[in-house]
Image (cartoon, rainbow, N blue to C red):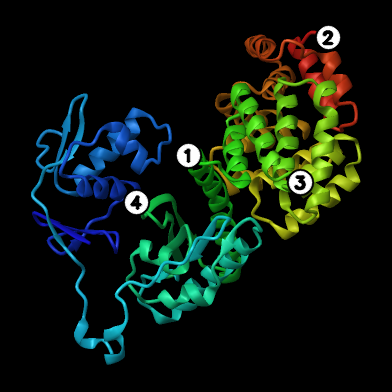
Amino acid sequence: MRFVFGEHVLDAGRRELSRAGSPVAIEPQVFDLLLYLLRNRDRMVSKDEVLDSVWHGRIVAESSLTTRMNAARKAVGDSGEAQSVIRTVPRKGFRFVAEVQEHAPPVAHDVLPASAASEPAVKPALALPEKPSIALLPFDNMGGDPEQDYFADGLVEDITTALSRLRWLFVIARNSSFAYKGRAVDIRDVGRELGVRYVLEGSVRTSGTRMRLNVQLIEAESGRHIWADRYDRPMDDIFALQDEITERVVAAIEPSIYAEEGYRAQMRHDRPEAWGLAMRAWTLINRLRRADAYEAMELLRQALEIEPDYARAHAFISWAMMIGVQCGWYRDADVGAAIIEHAFTAKRLDPDEPWSCMTYAFVLGAEGRHGEAIAEARRTMEVVPNFALGRAMFAWMLIRAGHFDEAVSEAERARRLNPVGTFSGFYSLIFGFALLAARRFEEALQPLLQALTEFPEWSSTYNCVASVYGHLGRIELAQPVLERQRQVAPHMCLGLLRQRLAKFAHTPTLLEGLAKAGMRE
Protein backbone atom coordinates (compact mmCIF):
# COMPACT_ATOMS: atom_id res chain seq x y z
CA MET A 1 0.00 0.00 0.00
CA ARG A 2 1.20 3.53 -0.85
CA PHE A 3 0.21 6.48 1.36
CA VAL A 4 0.33 9.89 -0.33
CA PHE A 5 0.28 13.09 1.75
CA GLY A 6 1.48 16.46 0.49
CA GLU A 7 4.73 15.93 -1.44
CA HIS A 8 5.41 12.68 0.41
CA VAL A 9 4.77 9.07 -0.58
CA LEU A 10 5.25 6.25 1.92
CA ASP A 11 5.39 2.84 0.22
CA ALA A 12 4.66 0.24 2.89
CA GLY A 13 5.57 -2.71 0.69
CA ARG A 14 8.93 -1.34 -0.40
CA ARG A 15 9.46 0.31 2.99
CA GLU A 16 10.40 3.57 1.27
CA LEU A 17 9.61 7.21 1.96
CA SER A 18 10.03 9.83 -0.74
CA ARG A 19 9.52 13.57 -1.05
CA ALA A 20 8.76 15.07 -4.46
CA GLY A 21 10.07 11.89 -6.07
CA SER A 22 13.38 11.85 -4.13
CA PRO A 23 14.08 9.21 -1.47
CA VAL A 24 14.14 10.30 2.17
CA ALA A 25 16.62 8.62 4.50
CA ILE A 26 14.78 7.19 7.49
CA GLU A 27 15.76 4.75 10.24
CA PRO A 28 13.82 1.45 10.34
CA GLN A 29 12.21 2.12 13.71
CA VAL A 30 11.22 5.66 12.68
CA PHE A 31 9.66 4.18 9.53
CA ASP A 32 7.69 1.71 11.70
CA LEU A 33 6.47 4.58 13.89
CA LEU A 34 5.39 6.64 10.90
CA LEU A 35 3.65 3.68 9.26
CA TYR A 36 1.79 2.87 12.50
CA LEU A 37 0.53 6.46 12.80
CA LEU A 38 -0.56 6.46 9.16
CA ARG A 39 -2.50 3.21 9.47
CA ASN A 40 -4.25 4.50 12.60
CA ARG A 41 -4.80 8.09 11.46
CA ASP A 42 -8.55 7.86 12.07
CA ARG A 43 -8.02 8.04 15.83
CA MET A 44 -5.75 9.18 18.63
CA VAL A 45 -3.21 6.51 19.64
CA SER A 46 -1.84 6.46 23.16
CA LYS A 47 1.82 6.28 24.12
CA ASP A 48 1.28 2.73 25.40
CA GLU A 49 -0.20 1.67 22.06
CA VAL A 50 2.81 3.08 20.23
CA LEU A 51 5.22 1.27 22.56
CA ASP A 52 3.30 -1.99 22.18
CA SER A 53 3.24 -1.82 18.39
CA VAL A 54 6.58 -0.22 17.51
CA TRP A 55 8.73 -1.29 20.46
CA HIS A 56 6.73 -4.49 20.97
CA GLY A 57 6.03 -3.66 24.60
CA ARG A 58 9.68 -3.35 25.59
CA ILE A 59 10.52 -0.87 28.32
CA VAL A 60 12.11 2.22 26.75
CA ALA A 61 13.02 5.63 28.08
CA GLU A 62 10.69 8.56 27.46
CA SER A 63 13.53 10.25 25.63
CA SER A 64 13.71 7.38 23.11
CA LEU A 65 10.08 7.84 22.10
CA THR A 66 10.55 11.61 21.90
CA THR A 67 13.66 11.22 19.73
CA ARG A 68 11.91 8.85 17.31
CA MET A 69 8.83 11.08 17.13
CA ASN A 70 10.98 14.11 16.33
CA ALA A 71 12.79 12.09 13.64
CA ALA A 72 9.45 11.04 12.12
CA ARG A 73 8.31 14.67 12.01
CA LYS A 74 11.58 15.76 10.41
CA ALA A 75 11.28 13.02 7.76
CA VAL A 76 7.88 14.35 6.64
CA GLY A 77 8.77 18.06 6.84
CA ASP A 78 6.95 18.66 10.13
CA SER A 79 8.18 20.10 13.43
CA GLY A 80 7.23 20.04 17.09
CA GLU A 81 6.03 23.63 16.79
CA ALA A 82 3.96 23.28 13.60
CA GLN A 83 2.58 19.75 14.15
CA SER A 84 0.82 19.95 10.80
CA VAL A 85 1.39 16.25 10.07
CA ILE A 86 1.85 14.53 13.43
CA ARG A 87 0.06 16.07 16.38
CA THR A 88 0.83 15.43 20.04
CA VAL A 89 -1.97 15.91 22.55
CA PRO A 90 -0.56 16.14 26.09
CA ARG A 91 -1.52 13.17 28.31
CA LYS A 92 -3.61 11.77 25.43
CA GLY A 93 -1.35 10.52 22.68
CA PHE A 94 -0.54 11.13 19.02
CA ARG A 95 -2.41 11.40 15.74
CA PHE A 96 -1.48 11.68 12.06
CA VAL A 97 -3.53 14.71 10.97
CA ALA A 98 -2.39 15.45 7.39
CA GLU A 99 -4.74 14.53 4.56
CA VAL A 100 -3.82 11.11 3.15
CA GLN A 101 -4.72 9.18 0.01
CA GLU A 102 -4.15 5.44 -0.26
CA HIS A 103 -3.14 3.78 -3.52
CA ALA A 104 -2.62 0.11 -4.20
CA PRO A 105 0.76 -0.63 -5.82
CA PRO A 106 0.54 -0.69 -9.63
CA VAL A 107 0.39 -4.05 -11.38
CA ALA A 108 1.64 -4.35 -14.95
CA HIS A 109 -1.13 -6.62 -16.29
CA ASP A 110 -0.10 -6.08 -19.89
CA VAL A 111 3.26 -7.78 -19.42
CA LEU A 112 1.93 -10.86 -17.61
CA PRO A 113 1.87 -14.10 -19.58
CA ALA A 114 -1.58 -15.34 -20.54
CA SER A 115 -1.23 -18.34 -18.24
CA ALA A 116 -0.91 -16.04 -15.28
CA ALA A 117 -4.35 -14.52 -15.75
CA SER A 118 -6.06 -17.42 -14.05
CA GLU A 119 -3.61 -17.66 -11.16
CA PRO A 120 -4.72 -16.31 -7.78
CA ALA A 121 -3.36 -12.87 -6.91
CA VAL A 122 -2.15 -14.06 -3.51
CA LYS A 123 -0.38 -17.35 -2.96
CA PRO A 124 -1.74 -19.52 -0.15
CA ALA A 125 0.09 -19.07 3.15
CA LEU A 126 2.27 -21.88 4.45
CA ALA A 127 1.87 -22.99 8.03
CA LEU A 128 4.62 -21.80 10.37
CA PRO A 129 6.97 -24.49 11.74
CA GLU A 130 6.81 -25.24 15.45
CA LYS A 131 10.22 -23.66 16.07
CA PRO A 132 11.31 -20.14 15.05
CA SER A 133 11.81 -19.80 11.30
CA ILE A 134 13.71 -17.41 9.05
CA ALA A 135 14.35 -16.69 5.38
CA LEU A 136 17.27 -14.67 4.05
CA LEU A 137 16.41 -12.59 1.00
CA PRO A 138 19.14 -11.86 -1.56
CA PHE A 139 20.97 -8.68 -0.62
CA ASP A 140 20.46 -5.79 -3.03
CA ASN A 141 23.55 -4.74 -4.95
CA MET A 142 23.16 -0.96 -4.64
CA GLY A 143 26.38 -0.16 -6.50
CA GLY A 144 24.92 -1.24 -9.82
CA ASP A 145 28.05 -3.18 -10.80
CA PRO A 146 26.96 -6.70 -11.83
CA GLU A 147 30.42 -7.95 -10.89
CA GLN A 148 29.60 -7.24 -7.24
CA ASP A 149 26.59 -9.57 -7.25
CA TYR A 150 28.86 -12.47 -6.38
CA PHE A 151 29.91 -10.73 -3.17
CA ALA A 152 26.33 -9.95 -2.06
CA ASP A 153 25.13 -13.46 -2.95
CA GLY A 154 28.13 -15.02 -1.22
CA LEU A 155 27.34 -13.15 1.98
CA VAL A 156 23.75 -14.42 1.98
CA GLU A 157 24.92 -17.98 1.36
CA ASP A 158 27.47 -17.82 4.18
CA ILE A 159 24.96 -16.37 6.65
CA THR A 160 22.35 -18.96 5.63
CA THR A 161 24.85 -21.76 6.24
CA ALA A 162 25.87 -20.34 9.62
CA LEU A 163 22.25 -19.93 10.75
CA SER A 164 21.48 -23.48 9.63
CA ARG A 165 23.88 -24.69 12.32
CA LEU A 166 21.52 -23.35 14.96
CA ARG A 167 19.46 -26.47 15.47
CA TRP A 168 16.60 -24.59 17.17
CA LEU A 169 16.08 -22.40 14.08
CA PHE A 170 14.23 -23.42 10.88
CA VAL A 171 16.10 -21.82 7.94
CA ILE A 172 14.63 -21.68 4.44
CA ALA A 173 16.95 -23.08 1.79
CA ARG A 174 18.87 -20.66 -0.43
CA ASN A 175 17.10 -21.71 -3.64
CA SER A 176 13.68 -20.75 -2.27
CA SER A 177 14.90 -17.40 -0.93
CA PHE A 178 16.72 -16.51 -4.15
CA ALA A 179 13.46 -16.81 -6.10
CA TYR A 180 12.88 -13.24 -4.86
CA LYS A 181 16.13 -11.89 -6.30
CA GLY A 182 15.60 -8.67 -8.22
CA ARG A 183 11.96 -8.36 -7.15
CA ALA A 184 10.35 -5.66 -5.03
CA VAL A 185 8.43 -7.61 -2.41
CA ASP A 186 6.31 -7.02 0.65
CA ILE A 187 7.98 -8.76 3.59
CA ARG A 188 4.59 -9.91 4.85
CA ASP A 189 3.99 -11.70 1.56
CA VAL A 190 7.39 -13.38 1.82
CA GLY A 191 6.56 -14.59 5.31
CA ARG A 192 3.26 -16.07 4.15
CA GLU A 193 4.64 -17.65 0.97
CA LEU A 194 7.68 -19.23 2.62
CA GLY A 195 6.02 -19.98 5.95
CA VAL A 196 8.50 -18.10 8.15
CA ARG A 197 8.21 -15.77 11.10
CA TYR A 198 11.36 -13.75 10.41
CA VAL A 199 13.00 -12.34 7.29
CA LEU A 200 16.53 -10.99 6.96
CA GLU A 201 17.10 -8.48 4.19
CA GLY A 202 19.95 -6.17 3.33
CA SER A 203 21.81 -4.13 0.77
CA VAL A 204 25.45 -3.96 -0.26
CA ARG A 205 27.17 -0.91 -1.71
CA THR A 206 30.81 -0.86 -2.81
CA SER A 207 32.92 2.18 -3.59
CA GLY A 208 36.52 1.73 -4.61
CA THR A 209 38.10 -0.50 -1.99
CA ARG A 210 35.34 -0.16 0.62
CA MET A 211 32.06 -1.97 1.25
CA ARG A 212 28.95 -0.93 3.18
CA LEU A 213 26.34 -3.49 4.26
CA ASN A 214 22.96 -2.52 5.73
CA VAL A 215 21.02 -5.45 7.16
CA GLN A 216 17.64 -5.73 8.93
CA LEU A 217 15.84 -8.52 10.78
CA ILE A 218 12.07 -8.17 10.32
CA GLU A 219 9.08 -9.86 11.92
CA ALA A 220 7.23 -10.95 8.79
CA GLU A 221 3.63 -10.87 9.97
CA SER A 222 3.68 -7.17 10.86
CA GLY A 223 6.71 -5.96 8.90
CA ARG A 224 8.16 -4.63 12.16
CA HIS A 225 11.93 -4.25 12.42
CA ILE A 226 13.50 -6.18 15.29
CA TRP A 227 17.16 -5.43 14.69
CA ALA A 228 19.25 -3.50 12.18
CA ASP A 229 22.92 -2.67 11.76
CA ARG A 230 25.41 -1.25 9.29
CA TYR A 231 28.91 -2.50 8.53
CA ASP A 232 31.58 -0.39 6.80
CA ARG A 233 34.73 -2.32 5.91
CA PRO A 234 37.69 -2.22 3.53
CA MET A 235 37.63 -4.94 0.88
CA ASP A 236 41.27 -5.98 1.20
CA ASP A 237 40.48 -9.67 1.59
CA ILE A 238 37.05 -10.66 0.26
CA PHE A 239 36.91 -14.04 2.00
CA ALA A 240 38.07 -12.71 5.37
CA LEU A 241 35.51 -9.92 5.05
CA GLN A 242 32.71 -12.38 4.32
CA ASP A 243 33.73 -14.44 7.35
CA GLU A 244 33.76 -11.40 9.63
CA ILE A 245 30.39 -10.05 8.47
CA THR A 246 28.82 -13.50 8.73
CA GLU A 247 30.10 -13.88 12.29
CA ARG A 248 28.78 -10.49 13.37
CA VAL A 249 25.36 -10.85 11.75
CA VAL A 250 24.69 -14.34 13.11
CA ALA A 251 25.86 -13.34 16.59
CA ALA A 252 23.39 -10.44 16.58
CA ILE A 253 20.46 -12.37 15.13
CA GLU A 254 20.49 -15.18 17.71
CA PRO A 255 19.84 -13.08 20.87
CA SER A 256 17.39 -10.86 18.95
CA ILE A 257 15.24 -13.87 18.09
CA TYR A 258 15.60 -15.22 21.64
CA ALA A 259 14.19 -11.97 23.03
CA GLU A 260 11.43 -11.77 20.42
CA GLU A 261 10.31 -15.36 21.00
CA GLY A 262 10.31 -14.80 24.76
CA TYR A 263 8.03 -11.81 24.33
CA ARG A 264 5.72 -13.70 21.98
CA ALA A 265 5.40 -16.49 24.51
CA GLN A 266 4.60 -14.00 27.25
CA MET A 267 1.77 -12.54 25.17
CA ARG A 268 0.11 -15.90 24.51
CA HIS A 269 -3.10 -16.50 26.43
CA ASP A 270 -3.23 -20.25 25.91
CA ARG A 271 -0.82 -22.74 27.45
CA PRO A 272 2.62 -21.90 26.00
CA GLU A 273 4.97 -24.51 24.63
CA ALA A 274 8.17 -25.53 26.37
CA TRP A 275 10.20 -23.51 23.86
CA GLY A 276 8.32 -20.31 24.65
CA LEU A 277 8.67 -20.83 28.40
CA ALA A 278 12.40 -21.39 28.01
CA MET A 279 12.79 -18.23 25.93
CA ARG A 280 10.85 -16.17 28.48
CA ALA A 281 13.10 -17.59 31.17
CA TRP A 282 16.20 -16.77 29.16
CA THR A 283 15.14 -13.13 28.83
CA LEU A 284 14.66 -12.94 32.60
CA ILE A 285 17.99 -14.63 33.37
CA ASN A 286 19.77 -12.06 31.20
CA ARG A 287 18.65 -9.24 33.49
CA LEU A 288 20.73 -10.67 36.35
CA ARG A 289 18.29 -9.63 39.06
CA ARG A 290 17.30 -11.88 41.93
CA ALA A 291 13.51 -11.64 41.48
CA ASP A 292 13.76 -12.22 37.72
CA ALA A 293 16.04 -15.22 38.29
CA TYR A 294 13.54 -16.86 40.61
CA GLU A 295 10.71 -16.26 38.12
CA ALA A 296 12.88 -17.76 35.37
CA MET A 297 13.46 -20.90 37.41
CA GLU A 298 9.72 -21.38 37.81
CA LEU A 299 9.18 -21.01 34.05
CA LEU A 300 11.89 -23.57 33.33
CA ARG A 301 10.32 -26.04 35.74
CA GLN A 302 7.02 -25.58 33.89
CA ALA A 303 8.83 -26.23 30.60
CA LEU A 304 10.17 -29.51 31.94
CA GLU A 305 6.72 -30.52 33.14
CA ILE A 306 5.55 -30.15 29.53
CA GLU A 307 8.66 -31.70 27.97
CA PRO A 308 10.83 -33.55 30.54
CA ASP A 309 13.50 -34.39 27.94
CA TYR A 310 13.99 -30.80 26.78
CA ALA A 311 17.79 -30.51 26.84
CA ARG A 312 17.96 -26.75 26.53
CA ALA A 313 15.65 -26.22 29.52
CA HIS A 314 17.91 -28.45 31.63
CA ALA A 315 20.94 -26.47 30.43
CA PHE A 316 19.25 -23.14 31.21
CA ILE A 317 18.42 -24.30 34.75
CA SER A 318 22.02 -25.31 35.31
CA TRP A 319 23.25 -21.99 33.95
CA ALA A 320 20.75 -19.94 35.97
CA MET A 321 21.85 -21.65 39.17
CA MET A 322 25.52 -21.09 38.31
CA ILE A 323 24.82 -17.40 37.81
CA GLY A 324 22.82 -17.33 41.05
CA VAL A 325 25.81 -18.69 42.94
CA GLN A 326 28.08 -16.06 41.37
CA CYS A 327 25.59 -13.36 42.33
CA GLY A 328 25.36 -14.63 45.90
CA TRP A 329 21.69 -15.60 45.65
CA TYR A 330 22.35 -19.30 46.24
CA ARG A 331 24.93 -21.14 48.30
CA ASP A 332 27.01 -23.85 46.69
CA ALA A 333 25.84 -26.41 49.21
CA ASP A 334 22.19 -25.76 48.34
CA VAL A 335 22.34 -25.95 44.54
CA GLY A 336 25.68 -27.55 43.65
CA ALA A 337 24.23 -31.02 43.10
CA ALA A 338 21.34 -29.65 40.99
CA ILE A 339 23.74 -27.65 38.79
CA ILE A 340 25.68 -30.81 37.99
CA GLU A 341 22.57 -32.97 37.52
CA HIS A 342 20.88 -30.62 35.04
CA ALA A 343 24.10 -30.00 33.07
CA PHE A 344 24.85 -33.71 32.72
CA THR A 345 21.19 -34.44 31.86
CA ALA A 346 21.24 -31.82 29.10
CA LYS A 347 24.41 -33.32 27.64
CA ARG A 348 22.96 -36.84 27.76
CA LEU A 349 19.67 -35.81 26.13
CA ASP A 350 21.24 -33.80 23.31
CA PRO A 351 25.05 -34.10 23.14
CA ASP A 352 25.29 -31.79 20.10
CA GLU A 353 23.13 -28.93 21.41
CA PRO A 354 25.49 -25.96 22.00
CA TRP A 355 23.95 -25.00 25.33
CA SER A 356 24.17 -28.59 26.53
CA CYS A 357 27.84 -28.71 25.56
CA MET A 358 28.75 -25.39 27.15
CA THR A 359 27.02 -25.95 30.49
CA TYR A 360 28.47 -29.46 30.64
CA ALA A 361 31.96 -28.06 29.96
CA PHE A 362 31.46 -25.33 32.54
CA VAL A 363 30.56 -27.85 35.22
CA LEU A 364 33.60 -29.94 34.33
CA GLY A 365 35.72 -26.85 34.84
CA ALA A 366 34.02 -26.08 38.16
CA GLU A 367 35.07 -29.56 39.32
CA GLY A 368 38.69 -28.82 38.39
CA ARG A 369 38.65 -31.01 35.25
CA HIS A 370 40.06 -28.16 33.19
CA GLY A 371 41.54 -30.18 30.32
CA GLU A 372 38.23 -31.93 29.62
CA ALA A 373 36.28 -28.69 30.01
CA ILE A 374 38.42 -26.73 27.57
CA ALA A 375 38.45 -29.54 25.00
CA GLU A 376 34.64 -29.76 25.12
CA ALA A 377 34.23 -25.99 24.87
CA ARG A 378 36.74 -25.69 22.06
CA ARG A 379 34.89 -28.32 20.01
CA THR A 380 31.64 -26.42 20.53
CA MET A 381 33.21 -23.15 19.37
CA GLU A 382 34.46 -24.85 16.22
CA VAL A 383 30.89 -25.92 15.38
CA VAL A 384 29.12 -22.66 16.40
CA PRO A 385 31.80 -19.94 16.29
CA ASN A 386 29.20 -17.13 16.47
CA PHE A 387 27.73 -18.26 19.82
CA ALA A 388 28.77 -15.10 21.69
CA LEU A 389 27.70 -16.15 25.18
CA GLY A 390 29.23 -19.59 24.71
CA ARG A 391 32.50 -17.94 23.74
CA ALA A 392 32.41 -15.80 26.89
CA MET A 393 31.86 -18.94 28.96
CA PHE A 394 34.80 -20.52 27.13
CA ALA A 395 36.94 -17.53 28.16
CA TRP A 396 35.77 -18.03 31.75
CA MET A 397 36.93 -21.65 31.63
CA LEU A 398 40.30 -20.57 30.24
CA ILE A 399 40.68 -18.13 33.15
CA ARG A 400 40.01 -20.91 35.63
CA ALA A 401 42.59 -23.12 33.93
CA GLY A 402 45.28 -20.43 33.89
CA HIS A 403 45.34 -19.73 30.12
CA PHE A 404 45.05 -16.01 30.72
CA ASP A 405 46.29 -14.61 27.40
CA GLU A 406 43.97 -16.84 25.39
CA ALA A 407 41.15 -15.97 27.78
CA VAL A 408 41.66 -12.25 27.12
CA SER A 409 41.55 -12.89 23.37
CA GLU A 410 38.38 -15.03 23.53
CA ALA A 411 36.63 -12.63 25.93
CA GLU A 412 37.43 -9.70 23.67
CA ARG A 413 36.04 -11.58 20.68
CA ALA A 414 32.82 -12.40 22.57
CA ARG A 415 32.49 -8.73 23.47
CA ARG A 416 32.91 -7.72 19.82
CA LEU A 417 30.28 -10.23 18.73
CA ASN A 418 27.60 -8.68 20.93
CA PRO A 419 28.69 -5.19 21.99
CA VAL A 420 25.26 -3.66 22.68
CA GLY A 421 22.90 -6.56 23.38
CA THR A 422 20.91 -7.20 26.53
CA PHE A 423 23.78 -9.21 27.96
CA SER A 424 26.65 -6.93 26.93
CA GLY A 425 27.53 -6.25 30.57
CA PHE A 426 28.33 -9.92 31.03
CA TYR A 427 30.84 -9.79 28.19
CA SER A 428 32.42 -6.71 29.76
CA LEU A 429 32.70 -8.56 33.05
CA ILE A 430 34.41 -11.59 31.54
CA PHE A 431 36.77 -9.35 29.54
CA GLY A 432 37.69 -7.39 32.67
CA PHE A 433 37.96 -10.61 34.68
CA ALA A 434 40.42 -12.04 32.13
CA LEU A 435 42.51 -8.86 32.25
CA LEU A 436 42.51 -8.99 36.06
CA ALA A 437 43.67 -12.62 36.01
CA ALA A 438 46.42 -11.62 33.55
CA ARG A 439 47.42 -8.87 36.04
CA ARG A 440 46.63 -6.12 33.52
CA PHE A 441 44.91 -4.10 36.23
CA GLU A 442 44.63 -0.67 34.61
CA GLU A 443 43.07 -2.20 31.48
CA ALA A 444 40.66 -4.30 33.56
CA LEU A 445 39.10 -1.38 35.40
CA GLN A 446 36.99 0.18 32.62
CA PRO A 447 35.13 -2.97 31.45
CA LEU A 448 34.59 -4.05 35.07
CA LEU A 449 33.08 -0.69 36.01
CA GLN A 450 30.85 -0.91 32.94
CA ALA A 451 29.68 -4.37 34.05
CA LEU A 452 29.04 -3.06 37.56
CA THR A 453 26.82 -0.32 36.14
CA GLU A 454 24.76 -2.75 34.07
CA PHE A 455 24.51 -5.59 36.61
CA PRO A 456 24.47 -4.09 40.12
CA GLU A 457 23.24 -7.30 41.77
CA TRP A 458 26.14 -9.55 40.76
CA SER A 459 28.50 -9.89 43.74
CA SER A 460 31.33 -11.35 41.62
CA THR A 461 31.61 -8.04 39.78
CA TYR A 462 32.13 -6.21 43.09
CA ASN A 463 34.84 -8.74 43.95
CA CYS A 464 36.67 -8.06 40.70
CA VAL A 465 36.41 -4.26 40.94
CA ALA A 466 37.55 -4.23 44.58
CA SER A 467 40.46 -6.54 43.74
CA VAL A 468 41.61 -4.26 40.91
CA TYR A 469 41.42 -1.23 43.22
CA GLY A 470 43.44 -3.17 45.81
CA HIS A 471 46.15 -4.02 43.30
CA LEU A 472 46.27 -0.41 42.09
CA GLY A 473 46.54 0.93 45.66
CA ARG A 474 43.27 2.84 45.42
CA ILE A 475 42.00 1.62 48.76
CA GLU A 476 39.65 4.56 49.35
CA LEU A 477 37.78 3.72 46.12
CA ALA A 478 37.52 0.05 47.11
CA GLN A 479 35.66 0.75 50.36
CA PRO A 480 32.22 1.73 48.93
CA VAL A 481 32.51 -1.18 46.49
CA LEU A 482 33.04 -3.65 49.34
CA GLU A 483 30.26 -2.05 51.36
CA ARG A 484 27.81 -2.48 48.48
CA GLN A 485 29.04 -6.02 47.93
CA ARG A 486 28.22 -6.86 51.58
CA GLN A 487 24.66 -5.64 50.97
CA VAL A 488 24.27 -7.79 47.85
CA ALA A 489 25.86 -10.95 49.34
CA PRO A 490 26.25 -10.61 53.15
CA HIS A 491 27.93 -14.02 53.48
CA MET A 492 30.77 -13.22 51.05
CA CYS A 493 34.26 -13.13 52.58
CA LEU A 494 37.86 -14.11 51.82
CA GLY A 495 37.49 -17.47 53.57
CA LEU A 496 34.44 -18.45 51.51
CA LEU A 497 36.09 -17.38 48.26
CA ARG A 498 39.29 -19.22 49.14
CA GLN A 499 37.25 -22.38 49.67
CA ARG A 500 35.00 -21.96 46.61
CA LEU A 501 37.78 -21.00 44.20
CA ALA A 502 40.47 -23.34 45.43
CA LYS A 503 40.66 -25.26 42.12
CA PHE A 504 41.17 -22.23 39.91
CA ALA A 505 44.37 -20.59 38.65
CA HIS A 506 43.13 -17.02 38.95
CA THR A 507 42.31 -17.30 42.67
CA PRO A 508 45.63 -16.06 44.14
CA THR A 509 45.52 -12.84 42.11
CA LEU A 510 41.86 -12.18 42.91
CA LEU A 511 42.29 -12.79 46.65
CA GLU A 512 45.53 -10.82 46.83
CA GLY A 513 43.76 -7.72 45.54
CA LEU A 514 40.74 -8.24 47.79
CA ALA A 515 42.97 -8.59 50.85
CA LYS A 516 44.75 -5.34 49.94
CA ALA A 517 41.36 -3.67 49.46
CA GLY A 518 40.28 -4.73 52.96
CA MET A 519 37.76 -7.53 52.46
CA ARG A 520 37.01 -9.30 55.71
CA GLU A 521 38.44 -12.73 56.29
Horizontal and vertical percent position of residue 163 = 60, 61
Callout 4 crowding tier (Cα within 10 Å): few <14, some 14–19, many ≥20: some
Horizontal and vertical percent position of residue 129 = 55, 60
Q: Which residue is mark 2?
A: 521
Where does the N terminus fall, quadrant-wise? bottom left
Tags 4 and 2 touching, CB below 8 Å? no
Tags 1 and 2 touching, CB below 8 Å? no
- In the image, 292 versus 141, the foreground residue is 292
At 44% across and 81% down in the image, what residue appears?
Answer: 147
Image height check: is 367 above or below 228? above
- In the image, 480 versus 391, the foreground residue is 391
Horizontal and vertical percent position of residue 59 = 42, 32
Q: Residue 269: give its label.
A: 1
Q: What amino acid is found at the position of numbered circle 2 in the picture?
A: Glu
Q: What amino acid is found at the position of numbered circle 4 in the picture?
A: Pro
Tags 1 and 4 touching, CB below 8 Å? no
Q: What amino acid is found at the position of numbered circle 3 in the picture?
A: Met
Q: Which residue is mark 4?
A: 28
CA–CA distance in space, label 1 to label 2: 51 Å
